[in-house]
Image: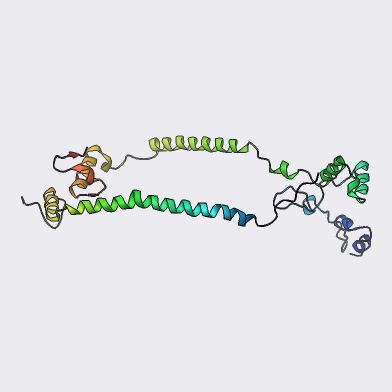
Amino acid sequence: MLATRALSLIGKRAISTSVCVRGGHGVAKVEDYALPAYFDRRDSPLPDVSYVQNLSAEQKSLKEKEKGSWVALSNEEKIALYRISFKQSFAEMSQGSGEWKSVVGGIFFFIGFTGLVVLWQRKYVYGPVPHTFEEEYKEKELQRMLDMRMGPVQGFSAHWDYENKQWKK
Amino acid sequence: MSLPKPMMRGLLAKRLRFHLPIAFTLALTAAIAFKYTVTEPKKQAYADFYKQYDAIKDFNAMREAGVFESVQPTGK
């Protein structure tokens, strides 16, 4: 702990990478994923860190120039500064891709495959349908529906002509 | 490189001002259309059916067809 406090004089960033030796157990390595990371997200516009961490000499001098008046910066320099801080612009990160075509294609493919599986199932897995599906039985069912006047106003029996014993034209 | 400042506030209010009247009009139209294409014809169909309906005659026809359990066809 004392070592960390002493090292904090060097600068804020140093703390996260400083070595903490406690009770003779050794060094705890700070993993990359545990440090603040850069991300491009529409709903969180300002990431925790700049995109470019290790500035080249040219970029460092540009950063120094940034401390002065911004009117003195040319357009290319402004863009260069932007690209130091950010990886993709909003327009770039928001642009659509053609991924949806693959997704829809995959959906159709698997629906088709499922159809084949269902057909196979119908043939090899399921037993025969009940006798109530036979033609004769169905005819008797429909006659009974007409006899008990099911749907007499706008439904089934409304379309049957009881006088002439046929469907209404 | 100086762009005009974009609209920062009132975005939902602006959208609602435009879309709510449309939404209400469409909903009202849908309801009115449904009333006059479905419910009114249905009510008329039922009224017409029951104007000429003879319940006893219908009952006897059903009885002869043998669909009842409480009464048998007159033959038996």
Residue B68 shown left or right of residue A84 in the figure: left
**In this rendering, would B15 be left or right of A77?**
left
Q: Residue furthest left?
A: B75
Image position of A139 (left or right of A87):
left
Instruction: Work out which quarter of the rendered image holds the N terminus of chain A and state it.
Output: bottom right
Classify residue A138 by image quadrant: top left
Looking at the image, which residue is at 89% across and 49% down? A70
Query: Considering only vertical position in the picture, is A24 above or below B52?
Result: below
- The quadrant the C terminus of chain A occupies is top left
Q: Quadrant of residue A74?
A: top right
Expressed as whole percent of the image width and height from the top left, the position of residue A72 reads: 91, 46
Q: Position of residue A125 (x, y in %)?
A: 40, 39
Question: Which residue sits at x=29%, y=51%?
Answer: B42
Residue A124 percent location from the top left of the image: 39, 36
Seen from the viewer's position, the closer of residues A15 and A81 is A81
B4 or A5: which is nearer to us? B4
Residue depicted at 90% across the width and 61% down the height: A4
> What scheme was used to colour the molecule?
rainbow
Q: Nearer the viewer, residue A83 or B71?
A: A83
For the image shown, how many numbered marks are present on the structure?
Answer: 0
* Closest to the observer, A123 or B31: B31
* Residue depicted at 44% across the width and 54% down the height: B28
Q: x and y percent of residue A122 in the render?
A: 39, 37
